[in-house]
Each structure stands twice: as structure tokens, then as C-alpha cells.
Image (spheres, grey):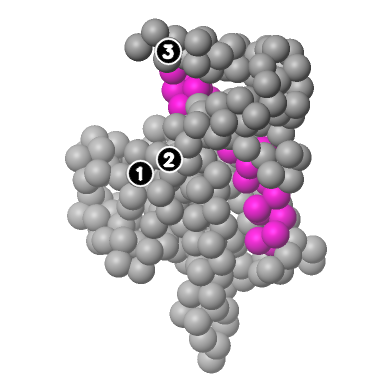
Amino acid sequence: MPGQVPAARAALAVLRLLSQHGGPVTAASLARDLGLPRSSTYHLLAAMVEEGFVVHLPEERRYALGVAAFEVGSAFSYREPLARLGRPLLDRLVDRTGESAHLAVLHGRDTYYVVEERARRRPSLVTDVGVRLPAHLTASGRAMLAAMPAAQVRALFPDRGAFTTRHGTGPASPAELRAVLARARRTGWAEEDGDVTPGLSSVASAVLDPNGHPVASIAVTFTTPGPGSEPGARAAHLAAETRRAAAELSRRLGGRPR
């Protein structure tokens, strides 16, 4: 136990230093400011990344506070680490699909949009950063709800009074929502077709934390295919891309991709 105390103090010092900086920090800077050997700093950071208290930002080659550190604090917020880690993944997703993509979190019964990357020459969307929409209507919300325990979903949507609609479509009762979420669990991704905006469809996949709990979702929105097309094939292709991006973001958060 005595030998573990210096390591614990060093870990706390890392957390304190990261919380005081305005942005991510390099390992070399942490080692210098804390007076630690560089090799020891890398070992310490690796352990803290594994436990979720620190996240590594590979594009920036820097480190920042992780989800677990935010959970400990009373002012916890997923938005900053999720936005930093998710934005480059959304950029690549837009490049691969040619469609607009967004990262969202669940706030009560609402989907709250944290990052949106719009593709060129694609319709404008209502899912701008900071917008809230009913979670049961959005693919993003459904992806997160499908990854939650059934009891938690029931607590959020106990009766018909918890449901709203935008265009008279979408689940309007706990039983209808259960059917939608059951389909999402079977396929591994969620979808919506015109429930948010007529003529537009979305597919989404959940992002999981180290405990397997959904902390966010990544979605792609596209024009609903017209008659004579193969909407199922298009949606499945885009869904596979969202699952790929969500799995990578889960990994970066120290979670367990589905």
C-alpha cells in the first residue's frame, strides 16, 4: 500500500493539471510540469486512459480529461471530450458517405446535438448544435435508448403522456417504442424515416462508455429513397458506417464497442 501512494498522488496531480489547462496537454508537458520521468508519465497516462480518467487525442497527440474524471466531479459534462474526440470521426464519416453526420447525447427524454458536420450539396437539417428533439423520434435517440436497460427506458417513457410527435408519425406509446427499440437491438443500429423531417431519413449507432452504458450516438441523415429504389440497402450501408465510427469513439472513451 505505501508504494501505491506516490502513484496515486501522481495520478491526482495529472487530473489537477489537466483540469487547470484550457485544452489538451502533451505528455512531455505533463512530465515537465509535474517533475516526473517521461517514461513514468507515459505508463501513468496509459493506466489512466484504460480506466477512463484521461482520453488520448491521437490527431493532436495530446491528453485531456476523460469521462470518468467528469463523472467524479459535480459539474460533469460529456460535451467537451465527446466533441473533441468525435469531430474528426464525423469528418471522416462525411467523407466516406457523402452525407451529413451528427453526434448527440441524451438529455432526459430529448436528443441533444453536440456536433454536426454537414456534407456539401445536402439538405439543411434541423439537427444543429444545441438543438433538442424528442429522443423517441430520432435515430440518435433510439440508438441510445435501445442500449439502455428496459427499466430505465420505462422510467423515461412510462405512459402515452411522455410521447410527442412532429408530423403525426413515430411511436406514441410504450408498446410502440418497445417494438422500435427491439428492432434496433436486432439490427445493431437505429433508424427513422421522416419522423423528424419529411423526406429525410437517419440511421444511428450508440457510443458506449467503459460500463457499456450509452453516452452518445453517431448518426447519418440522407434523403429518403424514392419509389423503385432499394432504401433498405442504402440504410444498411450507411448504418454500417455509423457503427464503425461509433465503435471507434467507444474505444477512444475506453468503452466496449458492440
Q: Quick one: which residue is furthest to the bottom in this view?
A: 228
Question: Which residue is found at the position 75% from the left and 40% from the top?
Answer: 60
**Dot 1: few (<14), some (14–19), or many (≥20) neighbours within 10 Å?**
some
Q: Which residues are magenta?
A: 67-94
Identify the mark at residue 3; answer none if there is no mark: 3
At 53% from the left and 91% from the top, the residue drawn is 228
Q: Residue visible at 51% across and 29% down? A: 48
Q: Where in the figure is residue 191, as x and y percent of width and height?
A: 44, 63
- What whole-number distance in Å separates the C-alpha atoms at marks 1 and 2? 5 Å
Asked if the magenta segment contains residue 129, the reply would be no
Q: Secondary structure at mark 1?
A: loop
Give the prevailing secondary structure in the magenta stretch: helix
Residue on which the image places disc 1 = 212
User: Are dots 1 and 2 in contact, CB under 8 Å?
Assistant: yes
Q: In which quadrant will I find the N terminus?
A: top left
Tell me the residue that label 2 is attached to: 209
- Residue at (69, 26) in percent of width and height: 38
Q: Secondary structure at mark 3?
A: loop
Q: Which mark is residue 244?
A: none
Using residue 255 as the reference point, say whether residue 238 is left or right of it. Answer: right
Residue 19 appears anywhere in the view: no
- Which mark is nearer the camera, 3 or 1? 3
Q: CA distance from mark 3 to mark 1?
A: 32 Å
Q: Mark 2 packing: few (<14 Cα in 10 Å), some, or many (20+)?
A: many
Quadrant of the image occupied by residue 192: bottom left
Q: Give the x, y percent position of residue 173.
A: 25, 50
Q: Is residue 203 left or right of residue 187?
A: right
